Image (cartoon, rainbow, N blue to C red):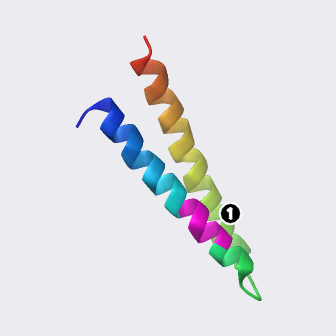
Amino acid sequence: MSLQDRIESLKVRHAALESAIAEETRRPFPNEVQIGDLKRQKLKIKDEINRIDGVASH
C-alpha cells in the first residue's frame, strides 16, 4: 500500500468518525463518553495523516 493509499484510507475512516459523532450528537440523550472517544479516535487519525504527509513531502 502506497502512502497516498494509506492517507486515503485514513481520510475515509476520519469521515466515518465525523458521521458517527454527528449521529450521536443528534440523539435525544447523547452519550458524551462515546462522543469523547470518537473525537479522540478522529484526532489520532488526523495526526497520523499529518505525520504521513510530512514524511511524503520530504
Occupied quadrant, residue 34: bottom right
Q: Residue furthest left?
A: 1
Q: Position of residue 3 (x, y in %)?
A: 32, 31
Q: Nearer the viewer, residue 40 or 22?
A: 22
Magenta: main secondary structure equals: helix
Above or below residue 23? Residue 14 is above
- The residue sitting at the top extreme is 58
Q: In the picture, which quadrant includes the C terminus?
A: top left
Region in magenta: 17-22
Q: Find disc 1 in the rendering and name its residue.
A: 36
In the rendered image, which quarter contains the N terminus?
top left
Dot 1 crowding, Cα within 10 Å, few <14, some 14–19, many 20+: few
Q: Position of residue 22 (x, y in %)?
A: 67, 70
- Residue visible at 73% across and 73% down? 32
Vertical comparison of 21 with 4: above or below: below
- Numbered-mark total: 1
Q: Which residue is pictured at 52% across the width and 53% down the height?
A: 14
Q: Residue lying furthest bottom in this view?
A: 28
40 or 17, nearer to the observer: 17
Is 48 drawn above or below residue 32 in the view shown? above
Q: Nearer the viewer, residue 8 or 25?
A: 8
Residue 9, x across and y down, in percent? 37, 48
Using the rendered view, name the quadrant where residue 33 is placed: bottom right
Q: Which type of secondary structure does the marked residue at label 1 adopt?
A: helix
Amino acid tagged 1:
Gly
Position of residue 10 measured from the top left corner of the image (x, y, whole percent): 43, 47
Magenta run includes residue 32: no
- Looking at the image, residue 6 sits to the left or right of residue 20; the answer is left
> Is 3 left or right of 25, judged from the image as shown?
left
Q: Residue at coordinates 49% horizontally, 21% vertically from top-left?
A: 54
